[in-house]
Every structure is written in structure tokens, then in C-alpha cells.
């Protein structure tokens, strides 16, 4: 009986690693396609894949290090072009959503603080200062439609890159108070409320419990209360629970979520999610599958890879 159980666990671990290995090249291809087609930074084809590739590399998976570096350099270059505007507190298109996602990408990628990150973090220090939190300006659900997401990104920028620690500390404290007092309405809100509470030093137990309670019978999570389980919601929840919520990857709920992701991965290594956002920019191909659903599918696949990578044990160094 014990041998059979161990055999199942080994097989499960092998399946998880295969799923991650299958998805990595697609995320890298989509990132390369995005950089070749556009000079701008995108969270769906650049930011989210960096989260995935960093998590995978941390668990011993092989990634294209040159391409990873290129994404970070592309991100910094995009911000640097508007560095003076950021230093003046003016920002650029996308405002706090864009600035915050780009800085979080650089943080996860291991970018060291420099003049560019100092200017952008200064902008985020003064942006929405009277509110105490950071309000989203975009309405592109799920990833760019929540003040909880934007507030987390502001907190992350303050914590990692702000030069004025007094001013940034005050902003983080106000944002923490807002997070504690505000009620999330959907999964995206709950995910980034949890991450924001974690990054701001607040207790996360209740927020993690709320996310766990929203798990569906099939093991996944849905973006909206009346929706069905999808890879974006499931992957983002699982990643937040481990990285910010104190939940172990060996937890039964986590294992059920992982099983859902494995069952729903496409043969090409991706996860398909249908977009809910209304297009406002000209469509372009990145090489990632699923046509006009490719941007949300790339983001969803990135979250799925983070969640699956976190379920893998770190390889022991000799």
C-alpha cells in the first residue's frame, strides 16, 4: 500500500514537471514575438511570463537565459524612455497599472535599483497620494481592472525600488489600511488583496482562507462568482496561496488545483482562456496560440506554470 502511494506521488510529480517543460517554450516564443512587434511593455506577454520563468528556473527547470535577460532589458528600456516624465510625477499611458507591472517584472527578474526604477517608483509614490491606495485606470479584465491589483503593484514598487523610504513607508501603511478595510468582489480582487497584505506586512490568514473557500468542486477557481473554472483564476490563486498565503503546495486543496491544471492543459502546452476584454488596440500576433484570446491565454498559462512549478521540489545542489 505504501509503495503504491509513493509510486502515485512520483508519477504525479513527473506529470507536473512535464507540463511545465511543455509550456516554457511557448511563453518564451510569445515574449519574443511581442518584443519584435511592439516596443511597449506588456504584462501578458512579458510581465507574467517573467513570473513563470523565474519560478520555473528556481525549481531547476531550464529556461532561455538570453531571452529572459532580453525581456528585462526591454522592460527597463520602455520605462527609461519616459524617465523624465516619471521623475516629474506624470507617468505615461497605462499610468500606475503599466508602471507597477513593469517594476514588479523587474523585481521578480532580479533587476537592481537604478535611475529608471527610482524615477518610476517616485511617480508611484506621488500618484493617487490623496487616496491612500492606487486606483486602476485600465478596464481590461481580469488583469487590468482591479484596484486591488494596482494597489499591490504600488506596494511592491515602494518596497523594492523606492529611494525615499519614509514616503514609501507612509504609502504602504495607508495602502495596507485600505486593503484591510475593503471587500473584494471577484477572484482577481482576492488574489491581489492577499498579495498586497503579504507585501505590506499584514496578517494574511483570513484572506487566504477566503480564497481557499472559493475553490470549485472540480478543483479549479473561476474569475467571476457565476463563472466556471479557468486557468487564469486557478493558476493565479494557487500561486498567491503559496507565495503569499502561507499554504503549502502539499495541501489537499492545492493538489486538487494542480490536478485541474494538468487536466486542462492543451496538447501544445498552453492553457486557453476566452477573453473578457474589449479590444482597443490593433491586434497583432506574437506566436502564442489561441488567436484573439492569446493575450489572456498567455497570462493564464504563465500563472499555471507558476502554480505547477511551485508544486515541484527544488533540485538539490551537489
Image: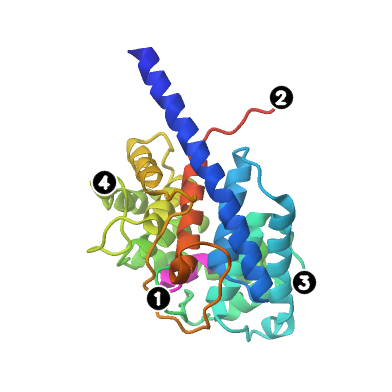
Q: Give the number of the mark in front: 4 or 3.
A: 4
Q: Residue 218 carries which label?
A: 4
Residue located beneath label 3 in the image: 115
Q: Is mark 4 on a helix, strand or loop?
A: loop
Residue located beneath label 2 in the image: 318
Q: Give the range drawn in magenta.
A: 144-153
Quadrant in the picture for the N terminus: top left
Q: Earlier in the sequence, mark 2 or mark 4?
A: 4
Q: What element carries label 3?
A: helix
For disc 3, the neighbor class at 10 Å (few under 14, some 14 to 19, many from 20) is: few
Quadrant in the picture for the C terminus: top right
Taking the image as shown, residue 55 lies to the left or right of residue 224, namely right
Most extreme residue toward the right, as rendered? 115
Q: Give the number of the mark in front: 1 or 3.
A: 1
Taking the image as shown, residue 188 lies to the left or right of residue 28, namely left
For disc 1, the neighbor class at 10 Å (few under 14, some 14 to 19, many from 20) is: some
Q: Residue 277 carries which label?
A: 1
Q: Disc 2 to disc 4, how far (Cα)?
A: 40 Å
Tell me residue 175's x, y (percent). 47, 68
**Residue shown at 41% from the left, 34% from the top:** 250
Q: Earlier in the sequence, mark 2 or mark 3?
A: 3
Q: Is mark 1 on a helix, strand or loop?
A: loop
Q: Are marks 2 and 1 in contact (CB under 8 Å)?
A: no
Tell me residue 256's x, y (percent). 33, 40
Amino acid at each position: 500500500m505504501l509503495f503504491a502511494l509513493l509510486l502515485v506521488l512520483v508519477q504525479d510529480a513527473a506529470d507536473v514537471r512535464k507540463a511545465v517543460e511543455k509550456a516554457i517554450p511557448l511563453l518564451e516564443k510569445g515574449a519574443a514575438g511581442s518584443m519584435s512587434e511592439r516596443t511597449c511593455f506588456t504584462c501578458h506577454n512579458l510581465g507574467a511570463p517573467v513570473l513563470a520563468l523565474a519560478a520555473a528556473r528556481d525549481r531547476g527547470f531550464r529556461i532561455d537565459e538570453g531571452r529572459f535577460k532580453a525581456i528585462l532589458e526591454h522592460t527597463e528600456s520602455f520605462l527609461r524612455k519616459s524617465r523624465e516624465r516619471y521623475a516629474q510625477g506624470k507617468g505615461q499611458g497605462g499610468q500606475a497599472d503599466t508602471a507597477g507591472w513593469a517594476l514588479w517584472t523587474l523585481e521578480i527578474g532580479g533587476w537592481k535599483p537604478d535611475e529608471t526604477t527610482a524615477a518610476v517608483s517616485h511617480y508611484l509614490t506621488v500618484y493617487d497620494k490623496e487616496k491612500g491606495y492606487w486606483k486602476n485606470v485600465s478596464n481590461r479584465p481580469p488583469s487590468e481592472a482591479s484596484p486591488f491589483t494596482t494597489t499591490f503593484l504600488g506596494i511592491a514598487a515602494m518596497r523594492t525600488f523606492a529611494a525615499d523610504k519614509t514616503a514609501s513607508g507612509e504609502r504602504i501603511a495607508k495602502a495596507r489600511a485600505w486593503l484591510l478595510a475593503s471587500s473584494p468582489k471577484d477572484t482577481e480582487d482576492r488574489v491581489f488583496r492577499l498579495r498586497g497584505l503579504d507585501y505590506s506586512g499584514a496578517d494574511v490568514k483570513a484572506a487566504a482562507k477566503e480564497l481557499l473557500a472559493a475553490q470549485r468542486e472540480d478543483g479549479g477557481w473561476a474569475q467571476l462568482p457565476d463563472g466556471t473554472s479557468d486557468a487564469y483564476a486557478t493558476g493565479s490563486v494557487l500561486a498567491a496561496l503559496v507565495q503569499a498565503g502561507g499554504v503549502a503546495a502539499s495541501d489537499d486543496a492545492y493538489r486538487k488545483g494542480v490536478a485541474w491544471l494538468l487536466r486542462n492543459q492543451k496538447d501544445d502546452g498552453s492553457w486557453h482562456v476566452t477573453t473578457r476584454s474589449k479590444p482597443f488596440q490593433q491586434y497583432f500576433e506574437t506566436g502564442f496560440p489561441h488567436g484573439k484570446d492569446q493575450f489572456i491565454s498567455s497570462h493564464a498559462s504563465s500563472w499555471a506554470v507558476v502554480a505547477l512549478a511551485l508544486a515541484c521540489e527544488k533540485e538539490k545542489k551537489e
